[in-house]
Image: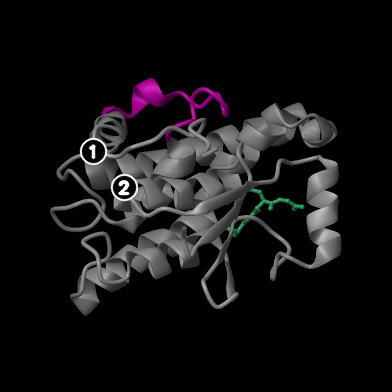
Amino acid sequence: MTDLTLYSMPSSGNSYKARLLLAFLERPYRHVGIEYETPELDATHKAGTLPLKKLPVLQLKDGTRLPESNAILCYLADGTDWLPPNPVDRAQVLAWMFWEQNQHESVIAVRAALLTYANRQHFATPERLADLLNRGHALLAQMEDHLAPRDWLVGDFPTIADIALYAYTHSAASKGRFEMDRFPSIQAWLDRLSNLPGHITLDDIPA
Ligand SMILES: N[C@@H](CCC(=O)N[C@@H](CS)C(=O)NCC(=O)O)C(=O)O
């Protein structure tokens, strides 16, 4: 029996963030998978299950439903080693998580979605794809410079900033066709995170 229910989209990096932290924390939860472009997603919208009309959503024991992947990470990480208690370190973690949402996701994840989801393909003009590729490489270069002298984004241990950025960076080559060979420090950081005990892949969907 568990107190938590996660509504998540199996193919989505934002939903993967929550599944990944729950796995690292070894927290049991009920999983409700709702995929893009399905009648289940339409029904979920009609039922009003998603407070901000997007997945993932974490439902707590008292019925409270938390939206926004990075807010869910903050909630789950509170009191654990994944969110530092020091206010300065904590603010640095949040800074990377805001950057993930307002810079990285809107380029790296969007190009991957344009190349992956059938109903987005008419938006995928060569000009748009090229623009996203250039902007993505610039963002990845920023991460590369930051990670070159350190193992983790903030401090000496992995935090939820690493999980937030890992979610779409780990598939940037396979889904977004970004040239990840140019970024060896990012590759080493991805390997470090994927070698942590409890790591699951995007495709490890709970039954
Ligand atoms: N900022 C949100 C973005 C969530 C989001 O865009 N979710 C998409 C999947 S990645 C979704 O729910 N799409 C379904 C829809 O728009 O109907 C977060 O980080 O949770």
Does residue 131 show up?
A: no
Where is residue 133 drawn, in percent x and y?
57, 33
Mark 2 falls on what kind of element?
A: helix
The colour scheme of the drawn protein is one colour
Q: Quadrant of residue 179?
A: top left
Q: Is residue 77 left or right of residue 60?
A: left
Where is residue 79 drawn, in percent x and y?
26, 71
At 82% from the left and 64% from the top, the residue drawn is: 47
Mark 1 falls on what kind of element?
A: loop
> Which quarter of the figure is the C terminus placed in?
top right
Q: Is residue 83 left or right of residue 41?
A: left
Residue 122 covered by magenta stretch: no
Three-letter amino acid code at disc 1?
Pro
* Residue that protrudes farthest toward the front in the picture: 1
At 54% from the left and 53% from the top, the residue drawn is: 30
Where is residue 164 drawn, in percent x and y?
42, 52
At 23% from the left and 57% from the top, the residue drawn is: 154
N-term-proximal mark, 2 vs 1: 2
Residue 178 covered by magenta stretch: yes
| Residue identified by numbered label 2 | 24
| Residue identified by numbered label 1 | 197
Q: Are the residues tagged 2 and 1 within 8 Å (C-beta)?
A: yes
Residue interval drawn in magenta: 170-184
157 shown above or below 73? above
Residue nearest the viewer, comparing 105 with 133? 105
Dot 2 crowding, Cα within 10 Å, few <14, some 14–19, many 20+:
some
Where is residue 156 drawn, in percent x and y?
13, 53
Three-letter amino acid code at disc 2?
Phe
